[in-house]
Amino acid sequence: NAGVTQTPKFRVLKTGQSMTLLCAQDMNHEYMYWYRQDPGMGLRLIHYSVGEGTTAKGEVPDGYNVSRLKKQNFLLGLESAAPSQTSVYFCASSYFGREQYFGPGTRLTVT
Amino acid sequence: SQQGEEDPQALSIQEGENATMNCSYKTSINNLQWYRQNSGRGLVHLILIRSNEREKHSGRLRVTLDTSKKSSSLLITASRAADTASYFCATPPNTNAGKSTFGDGTTLTVKP
């Protein structure tokens, strides 16, 4: 039982490049979330999903897209990376609105 | 704006003392959750309190919830150096509003 895993752990992008972050959970959770955390701050919700095939915008969705084609996977895409997207990205999942289980994070730097 | 807002932003205490952190939120909730984050790591769930509960205990943790004031508190008793971390309160995402569920946290430092 791996819980929530994130791929990759680190990534450096140049401005304008694109990438996809993968989140996988093996707990059969309905809800999945993508957050970003900037230094010294809390988590800000980017997008979330309440079930396979559904996605919804969070607080800071601009510049990101997501897909939930399979229940266990939640992908976060950056189509054209900007330095302002330099951050640590956390994925989480939960059994509906209950406690969230977090992945270890992806540290992304955009130069 | 943030759904959960913690207070104080930073707290420094001696080992053995108690630490109290507060959280305020804006909308109605089904439950409120507290998390801990060690530096550079993901968040770990500590305790969940339902909207119909007023107090909940888990080991050295005590959480209270006042839905009339839209506030919650986390008390850590007999603190240890290993309790040094950031603590966040959170509520489930509101499907309609999509507001952020985490505040900026309280950074707790426990000195040995």
Image: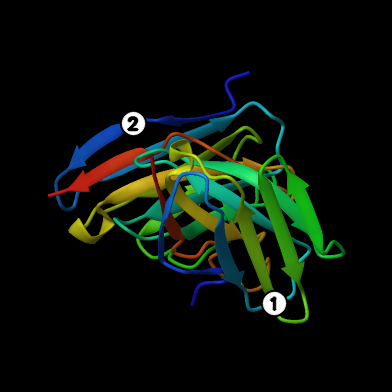
- Can residue A55 be seen from the camera position used here? no
Q: Amino acid under label 1?
A: Lys
Quadrant containing the C terminus of chain B is top left
Q: Amino acid at mark 2?
A: Lys
Percent across and percent down for residue A34 are 49, 49
Q: SS class of the residue under badge 1? A: loop
What secondary structure is marked by label 2?
loop
Residue A73 location, quadrant = top right
Between A27 and A13, which is closer to the camera in this rendering?
A: A27
Q: Chain of mark 1?
A: B
Q: Give the residue at x 85% y 61%.
A: B53
Name the residue rendered at 48%, 68% in the picture: A59
Q: Residue furthest right?
A: B52
Residue to which mark 1 is pinned: B70
Q: Determine if marks 1 and 2 fall on one subunit.
A: no
Determine which residue is flagged by label 2.
Answer: A9
Point out residue B31 in the picture as x, y percentages from the top left corner.
75, 60
Can residue B30 be seen from the camera position used here? yes
**Residue at the location (87% across, 64% down)?**
B52
Residue A38, placed above or below residue B72: above
In percent of width and height, residue A27 lies at: 69, 29
For label 2, the crowd category at 10 Å Cα-Cα, with few meaning under 14, some 14 to 19 and many 20 or more, is some
Disc 1 residue crowd, few under 14, some 14–19, many 20+, Cα 10 Å: some
Name the colour scheme.
Answer: rainbow
Q: Is residue B14 above or below residue A19?
A: below
Identified at 67% across, 59% down, the residue is B92
Question: Between residues B90 and A74, which one lies in front from this camera angle?
Answer: B90
